[in-house]
């Protein structure tokens, strides 16, 4: 098997979901999906971000008449079923199942039509881009698939090829940024970008607080929670690897 990786970039106004991601750069979505047959597919989506952004996405994302993944200008005739598996102020986990998708112009449907059943997809959406990874057979004609996808794009969408390589981190128990509350994720990024983790530190928590116009206690809390989460996940992963090594 190999992984085919590419990115779709959206201009403002070309897609209602992309517009929310553009308006709220803190929003992030990770998706796993699998093509069961040529006319059926399921998704598991994890979305984190500000409450206002998620409320806007609810109106679009959970609409059964709307194809969230269509690339062309027309809506497809696929029958969509959406179920909200979990919902918090800053997070959503959404199951989606599409059937009778013979006229669906989405990346998974185009891929299974071009390459056959049994493909597996991983996507990450932030800002104006959605990055796709597809697990495909060694002999898959991915060049033809790339041309097919590119030919389906409506105005305002652009496709760029990242790479075709050996599979990486498929099925691993790895840290997912989408599992960290967006406030903590944003704070961690700000701290890294401003040099908080450099030696010596380029900025203090008080300076971070002043620059971001929030209390110092909030900065400290968010950083400590994010660091605790990362450390816990790291130790869990190391423990799992140790058990796996023992068993083998």
Image (cartoon, rainbow, N blue to C red):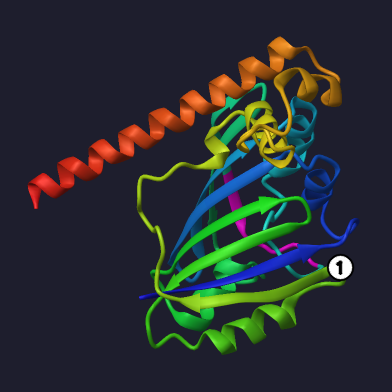
Q: In the image, residue 32 lies at what x, y percent?
A: 49, 53
Q: Does residue 147 belong to the magenta stretch?
A: no
Q: Residue furthest right?
A: 13
Viewer-proximal residue, 121 or 129?
A: 129
Q: Going 87% across and 72% down the picture, which residue do you hit?
A: 155
Viewer-proximal residue, 216 or 64?
A: 216
Q: Residue furthest left?
A: 247
Quarter where residue 188 is shown: top right
Q: Which residue is mark 1?
A: 156
**In the figure, 234 relative to 131: above or below?**
above
Viewer-proximal residue, 221 or 29?
A: 221
Q: Crowding near pointer 1: few (<14 within 10 Å), some, many (20+)?
A: few
Q: Does residue 80 belong to the magenta stretch?
A: yes
Indicate left or right for 197 with 241 as reference: right
Magenta segment: 74-81
Indicate left or right for 76 with 85 as reference: right
Indicate left or right for 170 with 224 as reference: left
Majority secondary structure of the magenta segment? loop
Secondary structure category for the residue under label 1: loop
Residue 2 visible at all: yes
Q: Going 57% across and 88% down the picture, which residue do you hit?
A: 143
Q: In the image, residue 141 lies at what x, y percent?
A: 49, 88
**In the figure, 64 relative to 67: above or below?**
above
**In the figure, 18 relative to 156: above or below?**
above
Q: In the image, residue 190 lies at what x, y percent?
A: 72, 35
Q: Quadrant of the N terminus?
A: bottom left
Q: Going 67% across and 70% down the picture, which residue do you hit?
A: 105
Q: In the image, residue 177 lies at what x, y percent?
A: 56, 41
């Amino acid at each position: 098997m190999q992984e085919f990786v590419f990115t779709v970039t959206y201009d403002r106004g070309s897609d209602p979901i992309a517009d929310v991601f553009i308006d709220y750069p803190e929003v992030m979505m990770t998706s796993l999906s699998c093509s069961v047959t040529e006319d059926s597919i399921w998704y598991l989506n994890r979305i984190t971000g500000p409450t206002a952004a998620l409320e806007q996405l609810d109106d679009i994302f959970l609409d059964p008449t709307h194809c969230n993944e269509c690339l062309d200008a027309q809506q497809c005739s696929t029958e969509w079923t959406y179920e909200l598996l979990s919902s918090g102020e800053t997070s959503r986990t959404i199951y989606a199942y599409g059937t009778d998708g013979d006229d669906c112009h989405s990346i998974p449907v185009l891929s299974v039509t071009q390459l056959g059943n049994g493909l597996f997809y991983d996507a990450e959406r932030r800002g104006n881009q959605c990055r796709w990874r597809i697990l495909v057979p060694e002999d898959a004609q991915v060049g033809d698939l790339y041309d097919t996808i590119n030919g389906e794009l409506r105005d305002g969408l652009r496709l760029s090829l990242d790479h075709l390589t050996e599979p990486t981190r498929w099925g691993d128990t790895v840290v997912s940024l989408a599992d960290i509350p967006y406030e903590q994720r944003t704070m961690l990024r700000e701290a890294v970008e401003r040099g908080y983790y450099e030696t010596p530190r380029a900025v203090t928590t008080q300076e971070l607080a002043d620059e971001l116009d929030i209390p110092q206690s909030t900065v400290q809390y968010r950083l400590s929670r994010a660091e605790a989460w990362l450390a816990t996940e790291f130790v869990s992963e190391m423990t799992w690897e140790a058990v796996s090594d023992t068993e083998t």
